[in-house]
Image (spheres, helix red, strand yellow):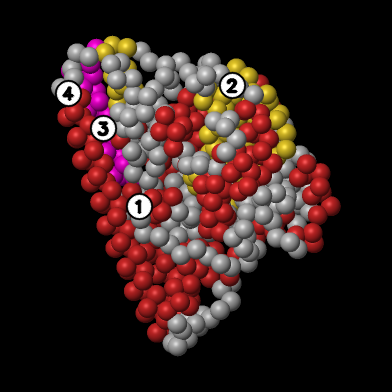
Amino acid sequence: MKRKILAFVMCMVLTTSALTACGSKNNDNPAPKTDTIVQPDKDSNSDKSSDNNDSKDSSDSNSKTEEENQIGQGVNGDIPSPSYTYEDIVNGPVGLCPGPHQKRGYSVSQWVNITNEWRSNMQSEVAKIEKHLTDDATDEEIDHFFNQLLYIVGSDYPAIEEINRFGYVIFKKDMKDPFTDEKVNENKQVNVEIVLDASGSMAKQINGQTMMNIAKNSITEVLKHLPKNAKVGLRVFGHKGNNTDSGKTESCSANELIHPIETLNTSAISKALSSVEATGWTSIADSIKNGGEDLSKFKEEGAVNILYIVTDGIETCGGDPIEAAQTLKNSGTNVVLGIIGFNVNATQDAVLKKIAEAGGGHYAIANNAGTLTSELYKITEATNNTYNWEPLTQVNLNLLTSWHNSCLFYNKMAFSGSESDEHSALSDAVRYAENEKIISYGVYKKLQAKIEERRDKIKQILGEEYAKREAESKKYLDEIKSRKGEQIALFTTTSRVNPHSDYYVSATGIGGNIEDSKKDGDKLNADKEESMKNDKK
């Protein structure tokens, strides 16, 4: 995870649902249903995938709908192998049907309903695997089958936040970011353009909300935290035509700046957003090109120009987004590129990551309302440039220590046991595959060994990363104690998992603070009591 403010500026480098309604990646809702992605009717799209690793749409796309171009071969396509580094674990794609996580608030009947629905969805996806394996299967074939299982049930591993989100100070004497050593500037002008995918698949639903509405709500939430002098514009694509071949030309031509880049006007942006509907095709290349041109008009010395694209799929309009990203990077316009893959699958994730890398930008995957808002908050972190100077006192030090300790605690709570949910899901999936004769018993045993190995690796890697965070926090707090009395600007915690933070994000994607967390808890208890009443009936 990248550091914020100037680190973000200088270094910025879904899973979709299956055709059946698989449980989504977010299992934080205490309702008795799993978080389900519901497919839109008629012309709307299904899940997005690709039958190759190229960023362009395929050459035979003239006879396909946008949906078909995105789906490709799905679970039977070329699926990337997992990488066991901390960054790849927490930033990796999530399965179509990740295993559910049992919350304390669930009643017995709720949990039974959740697991039964998940198991049904998982089994329907495993049954789609075309190549069956016998005892003479090669190691390569077994590895690929394991990748297919991860494509279906892989978990969403939470990142352990960097300590800059715990809270920190900037010393006036230094005027540099304490974690990157980059120079910082007060009151720099920030220009932002957010680009929203309005292709047909954004009409899919997660927990009763369309992905389009989730994205709109997340953008509106993030705007509340931007500085008043920021200039913000909004571009959308795919909002005209339709997602069939007959509407492709009109849809691919629809790449429009619907709100100009001007001094932040939250109500005007929200109004412009309200009329956008999920409709057609995906034009990422034009979004990068047009967005870069929009921002290149702002040439103030020291200004920060940020282009952030939210998309749930890959290019289907024939453009080359990698080339567009490279052109943007080499244009000298000093535009920072960010791409969020919203509910993308493993194949799309790999393609979008390459686009961001080509532009020297930042890429992140977001699988639900909460993680989408959390990722978009990076824009507000990058624009935070108003400093209130005061002496570093013992009160400040105590406050920072309290923030760091609570953030460490809530981060540990967020990732603890996450590998166990995936282990159970993979075990269920491989057991089903063996029962249905999709694999032999010999292959089953080899896959089960790989499942055990993966769980142990991930548990170790996450534990080691958390230990690093503890050490980094202690070192940082010890270092600043010796500078008591110097002029500092105090930056409060921007943690997404700590309910004491103004940047706390609940499962719904709405920000808040400790009071919002208490409300979530009260609702959970109320739901639990209601469920217990129903169980007794």
The total of numbered circles placed on residues is: 4
Q: Main secondary structure of the magenta part?
A: helix
The label nearer to you, 3 versus 4, is 4
Q: Which residue is mark 3?
A: 404
What type is the residue that disc 4 sits on?
A: Lys
Mark 3 or mark 2: name the one nearer the start of the chain.
2
Q: Nearer the viewer, residue 534 or 274?
A: 274
Task: Give the numbered dot on residue 299.
Answer: 2
* Extent of the magenta region: 391-414
Secondary structure type for disc 4 = helix
Neighbourhood count class around disc 4 (C-alpha, 10 Å): few under 14, some 14–19, many 20 upward:
few
Disc 4 designates what residue? 481
Going from N to C along the chain, the mark reached first, 3 or 1, is: 1
Q: Are marks 3 and 2 in contact (CB under 8 Å)?
A: no
Q: Residue at x 44, y 42 (%)?
A: 527
**Quick one: label 1 or label 2, which is nearer the N terminus?**
1
Q: Secondary structure at mark 3?
A: helix
